[in-house]
Image (cartoon, helix red, strand yellow):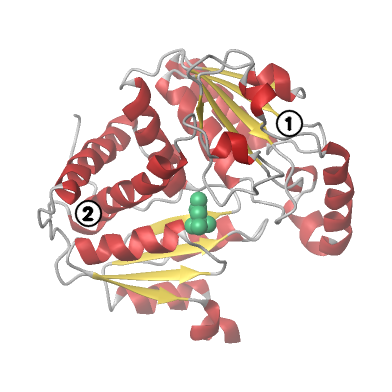
Amino acid sequence: MSQTLLRGKNLITFQDWTKQEINMVLDLAKDLKMRFAIDEPHRLLQDKTLFMMFFEQSTRTRNSMEAGMTQLGGHAHDLTPDKMQLSHGESAKDTAMVLSRMGHGIACRNCFYGIGNTYLNELAANSAIPVMSLQDDLYHPMQVIADLMTIQEYFGKDLKDIKIAISWAYATSHAKPLSVPLSQILMFPRYGMDVTVAAPKEFPLLGSLVKTAEQNARENGGKLRFTDDMDEGFRDADIVIPKNWGGFANYTFEEYNAHEDECRKEMKANLEKHRDWICDERRMGLAKRNVKYMHALPADRGNEVTPGVIDSPAAIIYDEAENRLHTAKAVMALTMGGRP
Ligand code: CP
């Protein structure tokens, strides 16, 4: 371990964290998971306050953070724009400056395409206390760290050449952000994994971050490939992660925000061409015999995945969801507490 001083560090993307720092989170999360299992108090953030600002709905992120703060001995404020003056146009700067005077951490979910990551960075630039992303348009660090913990629990710490399929899937629920697959292609090759992204050509990932992910793969002995064939993605995979994402990357941030209605219409038309992109029993049969099915949740049952797959023993989705709690606590304890 190179250094242990993470107090005050922002978490907008793990791309800004070294592998040693990420490993510290994983180690602490494992320890906190055991303490939770035996009901041993671990009040590492006693009397500390976290401000959580949710521009969108959430089940796992909201509850892992809020329950996590309680278990660490602190308190989390569950805020939404309608409860705050930002609904009257208060700036990210003023919001961050004021909250910095009152508590110990700011966490925010803002997934609006071309807006969310900029907003998070503006909060971070003006905050005297750590700012944590609860998902933006580009990154979902709290999800990917829980994914990594779960994968290590099933496959061991050395993930070199573990073959993982990150696949687009059809969904009617909503056009999901790019942040989960982007965070996964950035993170998994850093651990030597063999990543295949399968997606129809109308649903690319963001080119600039794909380039960074390819560099991560080159520098860490991982692999990153792309296909527009879902079956090919699944073939011989140890892990499959089939999930919808919107066709946002077809547009620049400016184009999308200037013509959102037209872009959404085009994305919907493209979506309907690919109803057959579902994770079903046949496709699971193309993967390795003990393949694991993962999903950040919420899943669109019957569209992204058949009930026969998501309710099968191959699915490790609830372990993955539980690990949101342990990893969130580790991030908070290290960045909001930690050694002074
Ligand atoms: N996976 C995830 O972030 O879930 P929520 O949207 O429920 O927080």
Residue 245 visible in this rendered orientation of the protein = yes
In the image, residue 312 above or below residue 5: above
Left or right of 21 on screen, residue 116: right
The image position of residue 254, as x and y in percent, is 77, 57
Residue at 70% across, 38% down: 169
**Is the N terminus in the top left, top right, bottom left or bottom right quadrant?**
top left
Does residue 216 appear left or right of residue 328 in this picture?
right
Residue 200: x, y in percent?
79, 32
Q: Which residue is under mark 2?
A: 333
State yes or no: discs 1 and 2 in contact (Cβ < 8 Å): no
Task: Specify the label residue 199 is tagged with.
Answer: 1
Instruction: Looking at the image, tell me whether mark 1 or mark 2 is earlier in sequence order.
Output: 1
Mark 1 falls on what kind of element? loop
Q: Residues within 10 Å of mark 1 (few under 14, many from 20)?
A: many
The quadrant where residue 302 appears = top right
The residue under the point 56% across, 39% down is 310
Instruction: Work out whether residue 220 or residue 204 is closer to the camera in this orientation and state it.
Output: 204
